Image (cartoon, rainbow, N blue to C red):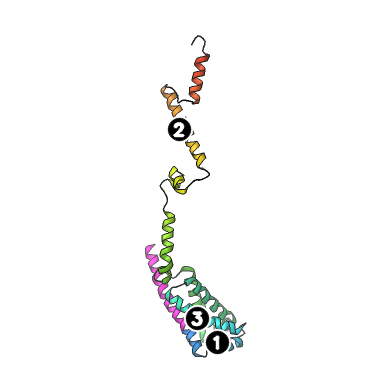
Amino acid sequence: MVVRRWLYDIAALIARIVVGVVFIAHGLQKLAAGGVGPVAAGFAESGVPMPQVAAGFTLVVELVGGALLVLGLFTPLAGLLLVVVCLGAAIFVHARHGIFVDRGGFELVGGLGSAALLLAAGGAGRFSLDHLFFGRRRARALREADQVTPGAWYGGPEAGRSAGPSRYDDGADSAHSADQADDAEHAASRSGGPSAPGSSTGRHAAQGRDERPGQR
């Protein structure tokens, strides 16, 4: 398990850097081509709805989302936003052209979107700002939640004291007291000695002596 975790951390780091750099490069390419205006015009020709909004959204997500992937910061959110961009590009632009990118197909956006989805689901790994800022806090909270008082897993008396008053405490104490009384009664009956005061065996023995004729 430790080896697999380290393998994922290294693989996630490599994937984040490569995929993030590719997205940043596409965002910079759009900026160099004139920014939102030309991109919106190209989206309109391809039939993308609300081309101005889609162009602005795509440009910002590619630049900011790509940078967040490289840093490993807010990775699930960044990955999902990049998946939305790739999905929109595949549906409205590339899907009708087949698979291969040299023919305008969805090869590139499909690969980038799948990698972004995997990072969003699996996380950035330990070599990331997500782990530095949030992972240690989450691990500490889990450790604190796992620290239980001895006997708590079995409903012992320590569990009641550590967890505070419970609506089951009175019943547990009564049952414990009853068990102690029964044990004392059985022990006294086996040894032939007097029973515990107030016990049923003691009362029955006293009544038997009173009812025997000629014994006062």
User: Could you tell me if residue 13 is visible in this image?
Assistant: yes
Name the residue carrying label 2. Answer: 180
Q: CA distance from mark 1 to mark 3?
A: 13 Å
Q: CA distance from mark 1 to mark 2?
A: 82 Å
Measured along the vertical axis of the image, is residue 199 above or below residue 55?
above
Region of the chain picked out in magenta, as a range? 1-24
Tell which of 111 and 57 is nearer to you. Answer: 57
Q: Residue 47 sits in which quadrant?
A: bottom right
User: Could you tell me if residue 99 is visible in this image?
Assistant: no
Q: Check disc 1: other Cα within 10 Å, few if <14, some if 14-19, many if 20+.
A: many
Where's residue 52, x and y in %? 59, 85
Residue drawn at x 49%, y 69% as measured from the top left:
121
Are dots 1 and 3 in contact, CB under 8 Å? Answer: no
Residue drawn at x 44%, y 62% as measured from the top left:
138
**Which three-letter amino acid code belongs to the residue tagged 1?**
Val
Which of the two labelled residues, at mark 1 and mark 3, occupies the earlier sequence position? 1
**Which three-letter amino acid code belongs to the residue tagged 3?**
Glu
Residue 52 lies in magenta, yes or no?
no
Name the residue carrying label 1. Answer: 36
